Image (cartoon, rainbow, N blue to C red):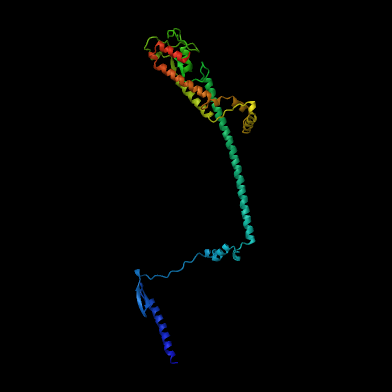
Amino acid sequence: MAPRTPKQSTSQSHLNTRRSSRINNRQLPSGTSSSSSGGGNKKREFPNGEIPQPKRRKLQNKAELSTKCPSDDAAASDGAVPRRSQRITPSDLIKREQALFKKEQAYKQQIQDLEARNSKLTSKMDEATLQLSRVRQSEAEAALAQLEEHFTCPLCYEIIAHPYSLNPGQCGHTFCALCILKWFFSRLHRQCGGWHESVDCPICRSLLVITPDRTPRLDVTFPFVPNRTAAAICESLIDKLAQFSSGCTMNVKREDSEGVWGSEWNIECSRKRGESKKEEDLKDDSNLPLWKHGGMLRSEWMKKDREGKKEMGYLLQHWTEMQAADFIALKSKLAV
């Protein structure tokens, strides 16, 4: 028993030392700690007076832990069968299939409803376009009828281009500038370059102002007066015809050798769009496409309007100083 006594005392003293060190650590003030090195207790100071806490391991979310597992990834990569707790039961699979089938049927029904609405909107748009084209065509026909009824030149029986009236305006008749110039210079004698006969209105025979032979002449002796009201109305109506006819297409007549299936197909399509045979005949007989930009009637009218402005402007500018030779040269230029 004698040799065992120092061992027990040694172990007891070691335990006492550890316990005392714990107590000393607890009793240490904030900002200090004890560390045993070389059998002695030493105090260590920390910056800011704070004892650092041991870092704890950050735990993942419970949902992630329950769903994600290394064994699942390994099983998925290896193509192994999932665990029994994660398998889909047949009843759940049937429920999912039924839900997907219901969604598919609902989507198909929505597609059918959208197609029906689209077809209705398309038909309404076609009807509106057809009605709009009919309204525009009726307006253009009314404008053309107004031009032909009230603004036709009595000399050339065409739409008045750059209209002018006679001076004095006792009769009120209006003519194309080029037409009335040709008629006026047709009374000029080519040998002497003067007017020896009375010049009157070609419609009502109202006398015009006599052209004096001496120069300089007065401006009031100019035999023509511009009709600006008629010119403005004609230009607006012709522009309206051009705007309407810009979208129209001319019907080209084909010979028998070229085949008739194309024309029959066009007629059938137009009848399906709601056009009657009478409307097709009116469309074929109408001159509206000829008044579009680049059309034959519009080009002729614009050419005549430019020539009338040019010749009438030249005559008005040099009227006071023109001699007999100048009148003869102008008559030759007009090819009267």
Q: Quadrant of residue 50?
A: bottom left
User: Picture coordinates of residue 3 (x, y %)?
Assistant: 43, 91
| Residue 259 horizontal side relative to residue 19, left or right | right
| Residue 294 horizontal side relative to residue 284, left or right | left
Instruction: For residue 100, say whether it is visible.
Output: yes
Task: Please say if 57 is above or below 316.
Answer: below
Q: Nearer the viewer, residue 306 or 211?
A: 306
Q: Residue at x 59, y 35 (%)?
A: 127
User: Picture coordinates of residue 308 (x, y %)?
Assistant: 46, 19
Q: Nearer the viewer, residue 171 or 269?
A: 269
Q: Nearer the viewer, residue 39 or 280?
A: 39
Q: Residue at x 41, y 89 (%)?
A: 6
Task: Please say if 99 is above or below 278.
Answer: below
User: Picture coordinates of residue 189 (x, y %)?
Assistant: 45, 8
Q: Quadrant of residue 260?
A: top right
Q: How many marks?
A: 0
Q: Residue furthest bottom?
A: 2
Quarter of the rendering occupied by the N terminus = bottom left
Q: Nearer the viewer, residue 271 or 290?
A: 290
Task: Please say if 320 is above or below 236.
Answer: above
Q: Residue at x 39, y 82 (%)?
A: 17
| Residue 209 horizontal side relative to residue 118, left or right | left
Instruction: For residue 172, say whether it is visible.
Output: no
